[in-house]
Amino acid sequence: MINQKVALISGGNRGLGFETATQLGKEQVTVIIGSRQLSDAKEAVRKLRLMDIDAYGIELDVTNDAHRKSAAGYIEEAFGKLDILINNAGVVPEGFTTRPLNSATSPEEFDFVFKTNFFSVVHLTHQLLPLLRKSSAGRIVNLASAVGSLTLQSMDNSPLAAFRSLAYNSSKTALNMFTILLAEELRNTNIKVNSAHPGWVKTEMGTAAAPMEIKDGAKTSLQLALLDQDGPSGKFIHMGEQLPW
Ligand SMILES: NC(=O)c1ccc[n+]([C@@H]2O[C@H](COP(=O)([O-])OP(=O)(O)OC[C@H]3O[C@@H](n4cnc5c(N)ncnc54)[C@H](OP(=O)(O)O)[C@@H]3O)[C@@H](O)[C@H]2O)c1
């Protein structure tokens, strides 16, 4: 088992995932890029190594059970433990910003979004828990979103009224419930579990209309990944501030 911290970032090949891997790598964390396409993982690793970051890549479509199992097998064999799990991979349904009407949500859209944003996160995390338990400071970061906050969405004049996509928003609300329950289950262990709202960030998902740069968008994940022993668990955080569920 190595002394250096080891992190797995799902969807680490681009967007917030790649930036989080970069920032973690610069903090001397060994990073494993999980990517749907092995070629994308390899390309991300090439770029990270050019920055002197200790990086590795694996094929990991989070919706694929065999990929999740082989990710755990690879990490066990190569590192013997996992310190940080960034559950970053996520999808939005087509027409996310232009067709937010609840009644227009198809069963296929629900399946697609929940499978990636919720069920796969739960399954991947459960698969990796034995390795996280071997860490002296296990940290799980679930990439949620403020649009999944029931409190913020139900406010009169909600600031998030423009972002009302039923499948996406509720997948992130469900993810927040996972954060709360898992944190409670792991309360007497070395593992902390938190939900991150990165902000509205200029990625492919966030679009060019977003106000935040990717560098800043990755900061919340980085902070939660590197929390010290006194840090929070079972919370919903954006840039160090707690958000309402
Ligand atoms: N950007 C924002 O404003 C914002 C706001 C709130 C929350 N978030 C959350 O932050 C996370 C990252 O978002 P982003 O803006 O960086 O999105 P992005 O630019 O669209 O990147 C999404 C990443 O997820 C990967 N992915 C999708 N489905 C996958 C699967 N089945 N298995 C493995 N990887 C998969 C993509 O891989 P491919 O390259 O193979 O497609 C890509 O690497 C998401 O969970 C998102 O919901 C983003």
Image: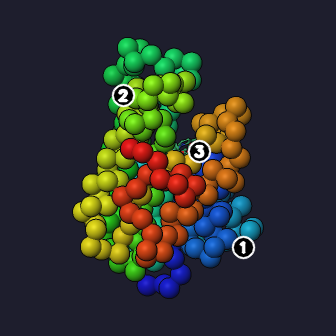
Residue 52, image quadrant: bottom right
Question: Mark 2 vs ligand 1: CB under 8 Å?
Answer: no
Inspect the image, locate mark 2, and give the three-letter code of the amino acid beneath it: Phe
- Residue at the (57%, 18%) spot, across then down: 98
Choose the circle earlier in sequence order: 2 or 3: 2
Separation of residues labelled 3 and 1 (CA atoms) = 28 Å
Q: Which residue is mark 3?
A: 199
Q: Point out the image quarter for the C terminus.
A: top left
| Structural crowding at the residue carrying mark 2, measured as other residues with C-alpha within 10 Å and reported as few (<14), some (14–19) or many (≥20) | some
Place of residue 171 in the rendered image (x, y in percent of width and height, measured from the top left):
38, 37
- Residue at the (56%, 67%) spot, across then down: 31
| Structural crowding at the residue carrying mark 3, measured as other residues with C-alpha within 10 Å and reported as few (<14), some (14–19) or many (≥20) | many
Place of residue 62 in the rendered image (x, y in percent of width and height, measured from the top left):
42, 49
Q: Which mark is residue 52?
A: 1
Q: Point out the image quarter for the N terminus.
A: bottom left
Q: Does residue 118 appear in the picture of this structure?
A: no
Q: Secondary structure at mark 1?
A: loop
Q: Secondary structure at mark 3?
A: loop
Q: Which mark is residue 110?
A: 2
Place of residue 166 in the rendered image (x, y in percent of width and height, measured from the top left):
40, 26
Separation of residues labelled 2 and 1 (CA atoms) = 41 Å
